[in-house]
């Protein structure tokens, strides 16, 4: 069995950058950081292995944010705070 990181080296963001994209897409809402917990990771995930076998991403982070926003507007997502939309909540329920 092989393990692959799925993504694109050009779309390698930290949480702060993603928060800024979300803020831009939903109308320049303020971003509140929880104390000094800003995402200061100094590494990037590498996607060379998956790209070598021909994988190409079709959508950007901004595309995904736009899709989620539209799903909320169209009421396809009724409660965006539901645990099923949270990796952290799902992991806690399944593994802890």
Image (spheres, rainbow, N blue to C red):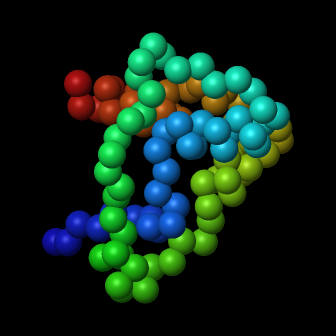
Horizontal and vertical percent position of residue 93: 33, 26
Q: Residue at x 51, y 66 (%)?
A: 10
Quarter of the picture containing the N terminus is bottom left
- Locate residue 26 relative to residue 55 in the image: left or right: right
**Which quadrant of the view contains residue 63?**
bottom right
Q: Residue at x 40, y 79 (%)?
A: 51
- Which residue of the protein is positioned furthest toward the left in this rendering? 1
Query: Is residue 9 in sight in this rendering?
Result: yes
Horizontal and vertical percent position of residue 35: 45, 13
Horizontal and vertical percent position of residue 48: 34, 75
**Which quadrant of the view contains residue 30?**
top right
Q: Total label count? A: 0
- Locate residue 11 relative to residue 71 in the image: left or right: left
- Which residue of the protein is positioned furthest toward the top in this rendering? 35
In the foreground, 6 or 15: 15
Quarter of the picture containing the C terminus is top left
Horizontal and vertical percent position of residue 67: 71, 51
Query: Is residue 75 in sight in this rendering?
Result: no
- Locate residue 31 relative to residue 51 in the image: left or right: right
Q: Residue at x 20, y 72 (%)?
A: 2
In the foreground, 94 or 10: 10
Q: Residue at x 35, y 41 (%)?
A: 41
Above-or-below relation of 92 to 48:
above
In the foreground, 29 or 85: 29
């Amino acid at each position: 069995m092989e393990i692959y990181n799925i993504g694109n080296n050009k779309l390698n963001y930290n949480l702060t950058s993603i928060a800024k994209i979300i803020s831009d897409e939903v109308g320049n809402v303020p971003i509140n950081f929880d104390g000094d917990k800003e995402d200061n990771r100094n590494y990037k995930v590498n996607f060379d292995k998956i790209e070598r076998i021909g994988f190409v991403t079709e959508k950007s982070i901004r595309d995904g944010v736009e899709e989620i926003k539209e799903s909320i507007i169209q009421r396809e997502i009724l409660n965006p705070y539901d645990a099923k939309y949270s990796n952290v909540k799902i992991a806690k329920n399944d593994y802890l």
